[in-house]
Image (cartoon, rainbow, N blue to C red):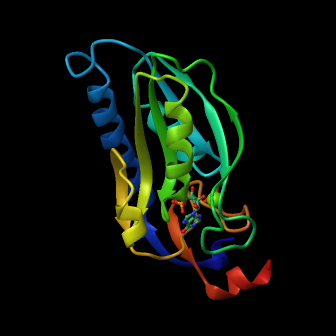
């Protein structure tokens, strides 16, 4: 796996520092006086957001519940979105709750455009979005995200939850892959 890495874009310590900063901002925004009522439900979009979300919420000393939603847009070895598809959800009752959707990366924007209206229909007090990465491309900038970890160039990256063909999610850094690594499993 290490031999497949081309370049480290974001290191472990940069990730840890930024995740803590984001968590502190989100916590302040969901505590009095900024917010007086209603608990938060954190909704990581599976599978890519699980690692980021797990780190984020451990810096958030708030009463919270966790809901789950599964979306697929880069099936298998695809390197561009094939259209976001809702595969499942386990949200609990989010009526009157402040929902924070958490995703690994904002790329074409298809995932957030699909999921946000579905959640709004379920009667939450509010829906906000938090993405760990945002790609530098026009489509990504057209979709609003309330909290963004890092803006990155429009490149295919893996690690810290992001995959290629479901591999590399466990890498602790954000990296690009050698072209040879992306050819071999397709
Ligand atoms: P969007 O729906 O196109 O905004 O993209 C969101 C989803 O596409 C993410 O949650 C990822 O699962 C996947 N994705 C987008 N860019 C990358 C990438 O560079 N590497 C791995 N997965 C990606
Ligand atoms: Mg993915």
Q: Is residue 131 above or below residue 179?
A: above
Q: Residue furthest left?
A: 33
- Which residue appears at 39% of the width and 14% of the height? 38
Q: Is residue 184 above or below residue 21?
A: below
Rendered image quadrant of residue 12? bottom left
- The number of numbered discs placed on residues in the rendered structure image is 0
- Which residue appears at 49% of the width and 39% of the height? 101
In which quadrant will I find the N terminus?
A: bottom right
The image position of residue 180, as x and y in percent, is: 69, 87
The answer to whether residue 136 shows anywhere in this view is no
Of 158 and 106, the residue lying toward us: 106
Q: Is residue 68 above or below residue 2?
A: above
- Which residue appears at 73% of the width and 64% of the height? 75
Rendered image quadrant of residue 26? top left
The image position of residue 125, as x and y in percent, is: 41, 21
35 sits to left or right of 1: left
Q: Quadrant of ligand 2?
A: bottom right
In which quadrant will I find the C terminus?
A: bottom right
């Amino acid at each position: 796996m290490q031999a497949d890495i081309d370049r480290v874009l974001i290191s472990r310590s940069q990730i840890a520092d930024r995740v803590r900063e984001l968590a502190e901002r989100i916590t302040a925004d969901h505590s009095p006086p900024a917010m007086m009522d209603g608990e938060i439900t954190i909704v990581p979009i599976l599978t890519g957001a699980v690692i980021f979300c797990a780190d984020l919420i451990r810096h958030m000393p708030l009463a919270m519940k966790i809901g789950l939603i599964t979306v697929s847009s880069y099936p298998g070895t695809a390197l561009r979105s094939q259209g976001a598809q809702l595969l499942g959800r386990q949200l609990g009752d989010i009526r009157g709750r402040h929902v924070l959707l958490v995703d690994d990366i904002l790329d074409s924007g298809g995932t957030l455009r699909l999921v946000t209206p579905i959640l709004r229909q379920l009667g939450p007090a509010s829906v906000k979005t938090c993405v760990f990465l945002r790609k530098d491309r026009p489509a990504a900038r057209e979709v609003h995200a309330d909290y963004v970890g890092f803006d990155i160039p429009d490149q295919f990256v893996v690690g810290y939850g992001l995959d290629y063909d479901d591999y590399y999610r466990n890498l602790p850094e954000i990296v690009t892959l050698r072209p040879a690594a992306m050819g071999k499993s397709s």
